[in-house]
Image: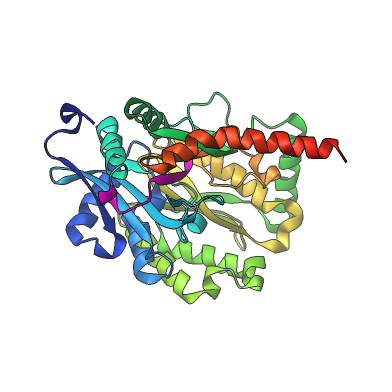
């Protein structure tokens, strides 16, 4: 990173979550609202509250870049064990907590200075002063996003080897797309949706879809409906897990003070049929949890609710994208969304032996695949 790119006031450091001060928290929050790609799962209201109230976050180290009295980059990393049967240790955004709880791990990068922020992050990771391994894994990055593009460009400029470790495609909805739900579905499936809604209304009466905004009362109804279903039976509903429930309500109360979550419901006069929660930052919506009344499962209330949720969000001029944060293994549910987004995990060899490993890894993988093919051919 050259001096004119970095600027004399730009510096990077590694900070444990437990050492974040109130000043740090405020600067982190300001960055979350300026981020090139918003990520509610790396927002301090989400992550610091989890650290205060839940277990499993003590391993997280924040690689931060500061410019004067502002933060311009935050990347959470956990030092893990040996990487893929090699002698090298590595650090990853998919640590004990974020690996299970974050549907998106793209770092928070200041939209006004992404190149400088990423260059300083890479320079810090390339130094032993970072106190992190030289092999770094960044998971759940939008492959077509500006952060991934700038990261690849900066790595190429400074000679850091980058290797894509995994890729998958998941559901997405973009307000700029020419087609929105349910128009992207086949005529037969749209007809079936109309029949399902008509049948449900014959059963429970007229249905109304409502956006309750950041209403904690509506949030309580969502938690009640979740607990009444299969998650409640299995003990995984938040009402059944006191510590998680306390964290969930605490972080959402913080989001709610600035209107950064919405609870949506589909209901009749008597019954709450479907309800969902989305987090919204800077016009980008992220699915978090939904539930439906399983007594009406024959009418696919989850399908009806998710279609109406999309229609409502895409009709809102303040919303530009909706990521339902849905794993692609849910094939039928994924089909309800008109767009797709590729998510990637990448490995960065920032210094030392890790660079040799990544350069050799494609050759090693090819040799292993060739050997496996030869073994199969002799059977």
- Residue at the spot 63% in from the left edge and 67% down from the top edge: 231
| Relative to 235, 71 lies left or right | left
Measured from the top left, where is residue 129 in percent x and y?
Answer: 25, 50
| Relative to 194, 49 lies left or right | left
Decide which of 203, 178 is in the foreground and name it. 178
Measured from the top left, where is residue 201 in percent x and y?
Answer: 70, 52
Quadrant in the picture for the N terminus: top left
Q: Specify how the rendered protein is coloured.
A: rainbow
Decide which of 360, 328 is in the foreground and name it. 360
- Residue at the spot 66% in from the left edge and 72% down from the top edge: 233
Q: Residue furthest top?
A: 178
Labels in figure, total? 0
Q: Is residue 315 visible?
A: no
- Residue at the spot 21% in from the left edge and 55% down from the top edge: 24
- Residue at the spot 34% in from the left edge and 69% down from the top edge: 52
Residue 161: quarter of image: top left
Residue 192: quarter of image: top right
Q: Is residue 155 visible?
A: yes
Decide which of 379, 224 is in the foreground and name it. 379
Measured from the top left, where is residue 256 in percent x and y?
Answer: 35, 57
Quadrant in the picture for the C terminus: top right
In the depicted structure, whether residue 182 falls above or below residue 13: above
Decide which of 249, 236 is in the foreground and name it. 236
Measured from the top left, where is residue 185 in percent x and y?
Answer: 69, 32
| Relative to 330, 9 lies left or right | left
**Span of residues in magenta:** 128-141
Residue 45 falls inside the magenta stretch: no
Residue 134 falls inside the magenta stretch: yes
In the depicted structure, whether residue 82 falls above or below residue 72: below
Residue 187: quarter of image: top right
């Amino acid at each position: 990173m050259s001096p004119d790119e970095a600027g004399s006031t730009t510096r990077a450091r590694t900070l444990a979550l437990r050492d974040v001060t109130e000043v740090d928290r405020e600067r982190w929050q300001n960055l979350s609202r300026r981020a090139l790609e918003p990520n509610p799962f790396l927002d301090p209201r989400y992550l610091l509250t989890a650290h205060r109230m839940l277990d499993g976050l003590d391993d997280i180290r924040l690689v931060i870049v500061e410019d004067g009295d502002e933060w311009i980059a935050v990347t959470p990393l956990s030092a893990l064990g040996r990487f893929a049967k090699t002698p090298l240790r590595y650090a990853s955004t998919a640590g004990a907590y974020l690996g299970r709880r974050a549907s998106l791990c793209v770092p928070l990068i200041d939209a006004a200075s992404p190149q400088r922020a990423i260059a300083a992050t890479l320079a810090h990771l390339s130094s032993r002063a970072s106190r992190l391994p030289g092999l770094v894994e960044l998971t759940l990055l939008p492959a077509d996003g500006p952060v991934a593009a700038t990261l690849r460009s900066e790595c190429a400029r400074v000679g850091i080897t980058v290797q894509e470790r995994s890729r998958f495609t998941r559901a997405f909805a973009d307000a700029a797309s020419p087609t929105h739900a349910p128009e992207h579905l086949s005529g037969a499936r749209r007809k079936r949706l109309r029949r399902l809604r008509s049948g449900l209304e014959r059963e429970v009466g007229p249905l109304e879809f409502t956006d309750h905004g950041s209403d904690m009362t509506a949030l309580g109804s969502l938690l009640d409906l979740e607990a009444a279903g299969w998650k409640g039976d299995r003990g995984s509903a938040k009402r059944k897990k006191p510590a998680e429930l306390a964290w969930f309500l605490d972080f959402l109360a913080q989001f709610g003070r600035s209107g950064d979550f919405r609870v949506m419901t589909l209901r009749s006069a008597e019954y709450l049929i479907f309800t969902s929660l989305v987090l919204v930052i800077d016009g980008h919506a992220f699915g978090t949890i939904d539930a439906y009344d399983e007594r009406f499962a024959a009418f696919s209330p989850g399908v009806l609710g998710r279609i109406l949720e999309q229609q409502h969000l895409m009709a809102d001029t303040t919303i530009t994208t909706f990521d339902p944060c849905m794993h692609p293994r849910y094939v039928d549910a994924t089909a309800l969304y008109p767009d797709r987004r590729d998510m990637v995990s990448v490995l960065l060899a920032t210094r030392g032996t890790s660079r040799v490993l990544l350069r050799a890894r494609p050759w090693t993988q090819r040799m292993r695949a060739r050997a496996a093919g030869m073994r199969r051919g002799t059977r």
